[in-house]
Amino acid sequence: MGKIIAILGDIHANIDALNVVLDDCRKEGVTDFLCTGDVVGYNAAPSECMKVIRELGCPVVKGNHDHYVSSDQNLDDFHPNAAAVVRWTREQLDAEEIDWLYNLPFVVTQMGITLVHSTMDNPETFGYVFDHFQAEANFICQKTPLCFHGHTHVPMIYEKQVAGVYRIDPQDFKLPIGRKYFINVGSVGQPRDRDPRATYVVYDFLARTVKFRRLEYDVEAAQERIRLAGLPSRLAERLAVGE
Ligand code: ZN
C-alpha cells in the first residue's frame, strides 16, 4: 500500500483549525503524519491540541514556542503579546505535558525525509528562512532530498539545482529526481500570508507529488476562545486576516 503523508505544523493551540485539517486528511486518504512543531502558543487550546497530536503517534520536532513554554526561557525581550501567551500556556499545561514538549527533538529523519521547525543550519536557534539566500545555508546541512519545515507561517518551496537555489510560490508539483527540496508547509493555526485559511501539505510517497491544502475553518470560534482566556485581542484579530 502506498504512503500518503500529511505534514503539518505551527498548529499553535488552534483546535478549531486542527480538527478541520485532520478531517481533510481523512478525505485525502492520509496514512502517515509528520509534525513540524509549534504545537502550542498564540491560541487558547494548547492541551487539547497536544492531546490530538500525541494520539497521532507521529514524529514531532520542537518549535520555538514549544521550547519557550517548556523551558525557563527569559521573556523580558519578547513582544508583550508573545510573552503573555507563553506565560498563560505554561499555566495551562501539567508537568507531564511540559516534559513532553521539552523532550521533543530538533530534527527527525524518517522514510528518507527530514523534518525541522526552522532550518537545518541552526535548528536549535530557530533562524528564519524567507529567501533563497537563507535557504542556501539550509541546503548545506540538508542530507535528504526532501526536508519539510515551518516557523515563518508562510508556505513556500525552495529548490536546489546545480546552478543555485530558487524560491517558488506554493503549488502542487511532482518532485523531479536529482534535485533537493526544502518545503515550508505553512501554518495550521496562525497563517501569515494574508490568507486566513489553515494550511498543510500532503506528500504521496510513491507518486512523489506534493500538494498544498488550504482550508476554511471557524475563525470566530478560535477568536472567542482567545477572548475567553483573556489573551491579547490582537491574537484574535490577526487570525481573520492571516497575518
Ligand atoms: Zn510558529
Image: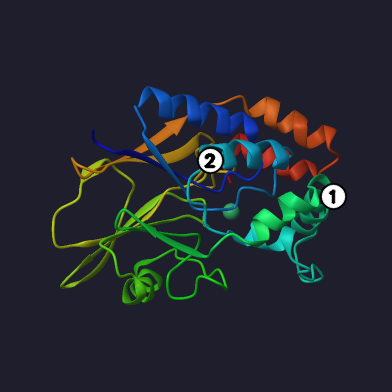
Nearest the eye: 54 or 146: 54
Quadrant of the picture in which ligand 1 is shown? bottom right
Above or below residue 219? Residue 102 is below
Mark found first going from the N terminus, 1 or 2: 1
Location of residue 121 (image quadrant)? bottom left
Q: Residue at x 28, y 64 (%)?
A: 144
Residue for badge 1: 91
Please give the label number shown on residue 188: 2
Element marked by disc 1: helix
Q: Amino acid at mark 2?
A: Val
Please give the label number shown on residue 239: none
- Judge the density around disc 1: few (<14), some (14-19), many (≥20) Cα neighbours within 10 Å: few
What separation in Å lies between label 1 and label 2 (alpha carbons)?
23 Å
Q: Amino acid at mark 1?
A: Glu
Label 2 CB-ligand 1 distance < 8 A:
no
Above or below residue 167? Residue 88 is above
Nearest the eye: 212 or 55: 55
